[in-house]
């Protein structure tokens, strides 16, 4: 079955630490990749997306993600986190051979200690 | 302000009762979706609609029903047949189904007592 895996369910970091959240998917073929973020008490919002082109994509608030096709991965990174990055992060994938429906990973809850 | 409005934000229900969650969008999007969010399971698709008067089951449609009589509105009914209805429900929309980027409402938290 097609799936999206986020292996880190909970991450705790201190401010200024570097962040990398893993995301792997099991689809073959052409995919579109997304990271969404849900800040406490707020709605889910798009952080960044990859459709084609440069596999290193930059999003809002200093986040970036790299699409590595050979590894079926789309890891999220940020060089230096802030307390305000405390949120839940969701990786999502839609694939041409899956009816273009968006499938979400289980989410990673990030807590940044001030 | 364009966006998606879900109501109510919090809802309590007794076992055996049906409850309807409202979702309205003023983004002029064709496609609308309902997801259920449970801790550690991410978002799972309940139903989606690509166009008015049409909707399709998602991965976990059992115990739920929807309607799409107007482009702007996509209400979700949680029926008494849903075995584990306590959850956080998210409505979303996109320009078209498969367009990729979804826009989400703030969610409705349903608790069954």
Image: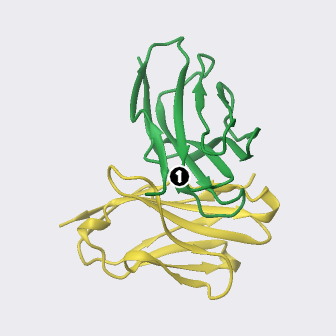
Chain in green (letter): B
- Regarding residue A26, the answer to whether it shows in the image is no
Give the residue drawn at x 69%, y 64%: B99
Q: Quadrant of residue B11?
A: top left
Q: What is the x, y in percent for residue A61?
A: 37, 76
Residue lying furthest bottom in this view? A54
Residue marked by disc 1: A106
Q: Quadrant of residue A28?
A: bottom right
> Label 1: chain?
A
Chain A as rendered: colour: yellow
Q: What is the x, y in percent for residue A84?
A: 27, 66
- Nearest the camera: B49 or A74? B49
Q: What is the x, y in percent for residue A10?
A: 38, 56
> Considering the image in quadrants, where does the C terminus of chain A appear?
bottom left
Give the residue drawn at x 51%, y 68%: A22
Indicate how the structure is coloured in the image.
by chain
Q: Secondary structure at mark 1?
A: loop
- Nearest the camera: B112 or B29? B29
Mark 1: few/some/many CA within 10 Å (<14, 14-19, 20+)? many
Q: Quadrant of residue B61?
A: top right
Q: Is residue B112 above or below residue A38?
A: above
Residue lying furthest top in this view? B16
Q: What is the x, y in percent for residue A77?
A: 44, 77
- Regarding residue A28, the answer to whether it shows in the image is yes
B67 sits to left or right of A16: right
Give the residue drawn at x 61%, y 66%: A24
């Amino acid at each position: 079955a097609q799936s999206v895996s986020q292996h880190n369910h909970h991450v705790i970091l201190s401010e200024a630490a570097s962040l990398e959240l893993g995301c792997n998917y099991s689809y073959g073929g052409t995919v579109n990749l997304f990271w969404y973020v849900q800040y406490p008490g707020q709605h889910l919002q798009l952080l960044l997306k990859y459709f084609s082109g440069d596999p290193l994509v930059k999003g809002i608030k200093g986040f970036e993600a790299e699409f590595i096709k050979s590894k079926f991965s789309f890891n999220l990174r940020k060089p230096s986190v802030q307390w305000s990055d405390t949120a839940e992060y969701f990786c999502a994938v839609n694939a041409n051979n899956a009816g273009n429906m968006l499938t979400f990973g289980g989410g990673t809850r990030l807590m940044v200690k001030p | 302000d364009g966006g998606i409005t879900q109501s109510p934000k919090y809802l309590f229900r007794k076992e055996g009762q049906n409850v309807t969650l409202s979702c309205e969008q003023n983004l002029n999007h064709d496609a609308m979706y309902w997801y259920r969010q449970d801790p550690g399971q991410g978002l799972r698709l309940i139903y989606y609609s690509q166009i008015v008067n049409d909707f399709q089951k998602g991965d976990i449609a059992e115990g739920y029903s929807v309607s799409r009589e107007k482009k702007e509105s996509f209400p979700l009914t949680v029926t008494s047949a849903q075995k584990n209805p306590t959850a956080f429900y998210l409505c979303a929309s996109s320009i078209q189904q498969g367009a990729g980027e979804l826009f989400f409402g703030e969610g409705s938290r349903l608790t069954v007592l």
